[in-house]
Image (cartoon, rainbow, N blue to C red):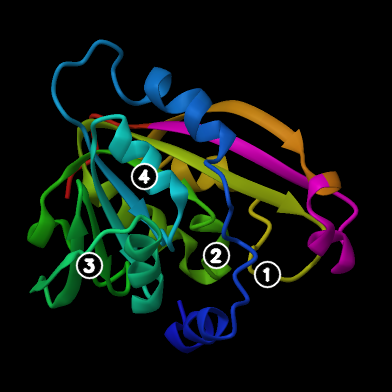
Amino acid sequence: MEKNFWQSRWDEGQIGFHQDAVHPALATYFSRALASEGASRTQRVLVPLCGKSLDLTWLETQGHQVLGVEFVEKAAQEYFASRGLEPTVSTAGGALNYQAAGVTIVVGDFFAVSPDSYGKVDAIYDRAALVAIAPERRKPYVAQLASWLRPGGSLLLISFEHDMGTGPPFSVPETQDLLRPFFEVGSLDEEDVLEAEPRFRQRGATYLRERVFLGTLKDTTTF
């Protein structure tokens, strides 16, 4: 991932990937698929490439401890400012950490941030993260996701398939194949969302399939 690319996008306000509402797939599937219905303990949830997503707040209000990882410090600052919170800023694991109200955002390269510094998590929520990764780095990215999970941990991942020919967001038709070395994978939902995404039509897309996957870490996975 190129930090300069993402830094410029935030500096120029070109953040069309940011949504002004909680993603409906998160609200629909998280509690059923990941949070172990009726579980009494707090779940630790990792959100890679989190930006300033409102999904972080939704997860926190469900009672979870949320750990986001984000390249761009401005995104972390804007997230807490949007909630009217003054975060505690510290350094851990060689990165800046912004923390308030059950949400911590680590400012750093996701490939360089280690669970050795922050501890394993129960679940991972990936929206617009895998699809932002260059094709040659997808396999290492999925391996990095798996390394964060406790045994039996789960991944809720939202992917795209399209015919624009360019990214990000990249088209990832091989999502299930990428996940299978580490996860038992099931498909939860699929929808063509092009009608609601004019910026993709402007880039030449004739379809934009949004796909939702659930992965459960395989028992044989070791790190």
Find the magenta span and give its range: 196-215
Query: Between 98 and 123, which is closer to the camera in this rendering?
Result: 98
Q: Which is more N-terminal, label 3 or label 2?
A: 3
Amino acid type at circle 2 is Ala
Report whether 76 appears left or right of 2.
left
Near mark 1 (Cα within 10 A), the count class, few <14, some 14-19 or many ≥20, is: few
Residue 95 visible at all: yes
Return the residue at label 4: 57
Residue mark closest to the camera, 4 vs 3:
4
SS at circle 1: loop
Q: Residue at x 19, y 55 (%)?
A: 100
Return the residue at label 2: 132
Q: Position of residue 112 (x, y in %)?
A: 25, 72
Return the residue at label 1: 167
Return the residue at label 3: 113
Q: Position of residue 159 (x, y in %)?
A: 59, 47
